[in-house]
Image: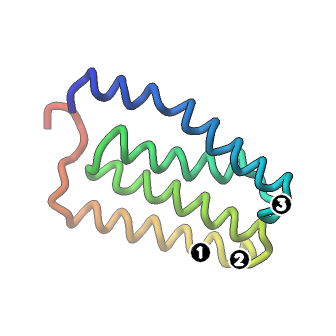
Amino acid sequence: MDSQKTDEKSGLVVPVLLLTIGVGWLLTNLGFVPKVEWAWSLGLIAGGALMLVIRGINKGSIVIGPFLIFCGLLSIVRQAGMIDWEVEFPCLVIAMGALLLIAKISNLPSGVEGE
């Protein structure tokens, strides 16, 4: 990926995170969504999405990006009282294993410069 394009995309990280966290916080304070630690949960989701946008789809980002998104979503679901830790953690382990397997068997680029 072109260095200038990467710099432009990485400059979006802080504004997008702030917008995402602020919207979640506002929706909670207005009573539209359950009480959730939005800074943590939406930060994970936004971080995962931005990983895919900034780094593109490669063997590393296909593991880290979706995993962070899944972590954030499960965090919201747990905090809303729909699942417990006993369900969340095994789901995260399964997700990591599946994503690592996808990265291993895929024909995606490695994501490491020069390879």
Identity of the amino acid at label 3?
A: Lys
Callout 1: helix, strand or loop?
Answer: helix
Left or right side of 61 for 78: right
- Disc sitting over residue 86 in the figure: 2
- Disc sitting over residue 35 in the figure: 3
Callout 2: helix, strand or loop?
Answer: helix
Circle 3 Cα neighbour tier, 10 Å, few/some/many (<14 / 14–19 / ≥20): some
Front disc: 1 or 3: 3
Quadrant in the picture for the C terminus: top left
Left or right side of 92 for 33: right
Residue at 35% over, 23% down? 7
Depicted 73 relative to depicted 82: above or below:
above
Identity of the amino acid at label 1?
A: Pro
Asked whether the residues under the numbered discs 2 and 1 touch, taking CB atoms below 8 Å apart as contact, a structural biologist would say: yes
Residue at 43% over, 52% down? 65
Residue at 18% over, 49% down? 109
Q: Earlier in the sequence, mark 1 or mark 3?
A: 3
